[in-house]
Amino acid sequence: MIDQPLATRAPRQLRLRTLTPDDADAVARHAAADLERLRVHLRWPEPASVPAGAREWLELYARGDDGRVLVAGALDGEEIVGGALLLHYDPEFGSIELGCWVGSSVEGLGVARAACTALIAYARAQLAVERIEWRCTTVNERSRALAERLGFRLEGTLRSDFVMRGERYDSHVLSLVGAEIDAVS
């Protein structure tokens, strides 16, 4: 479980906390309030914009389905303003995927970077990962830029591998490996 302050440029102190199915109403409010922006690059906000869908999404992480480890929300008081998640964990290979999102109210304030940094440290210390992967569509330039600021290196592009709302996209694959993970701060 994660529950810690986030060092950001937000006007108030934010916290990063592991989200559980009990947070479904807060997730739904967050997703619904910023749905048009969040759904541009992410599949989960649309179904999670209602409490039942948010609960279903959070339960996938609570059960650890498909290697999901955790989803953590960046909180301003009790309201979610962004977050990060760890998924596709493979303990045999010591690998995991990191993802993040940020709401428009805190965009550009370092929230996504701080949340990712915290989850990178968690993955290394608690899960002993040797490889952290970052995937984003080639049209999501801000995501790739954040990954590179965190030290991720581009490995290549997977052609036509991601489908969202019936449209196919190419995806960039970036990674941190070994000591590169420890250098993130």
Image (cartoon, rainbow, N blue to C red):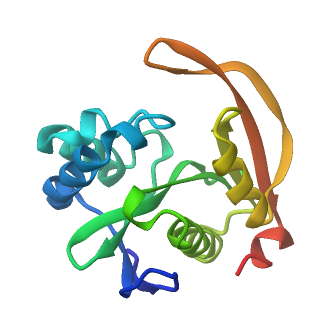
**Height in image: 123 above or below 66?**
below
User: Which image quarter: residue 47?
Assistant: top left
- How many numbered badges does the structure rendering display? 0
**Height in image: 81 above or below 40?**
below
* Residue 82 pos. (x, y %): 40, 61
Of residues 111 and 160, the one drawn nearer to the viewer in this rendering: 111
Identify the image quadrant of the C terminus: bottom right
* Residue 155 pos. (x, y %): 86, 42
Identify the image quadrant of the N terminus: bottom left
Of residues 49 and 90, the one drawn nearer to the viewer in this rendering: 49
* Residue 69 pos. (x, y %): 45, 56
Whether residue 131 is visible to the viewer of this picture, yes or no, is: yes
Residue reaching furthest to the top: 166
The residue depicted at 68 percent of the width and 63 percent of the height is 129
152 vs 4, left or right, is right
User: Which image quarter: residue 52?
Assistant: top left
68 vs 132, left or right, is left
Of residues 169 and 93, the one drawn nearer to the viewer in this rendering: 169
Whether residue 103 is visible to the viewer of this picture, yes or no, is: no
156 vs 137, left or right, is right
110 vs 31, left or right, is right
The residue depicted at 29 percent of the width and 42 percent of the height is 57
* Residue 16 pos. (x, y %): 40, 75
The residue depicted at 35 percent of the width and 37 percent of the height is 36
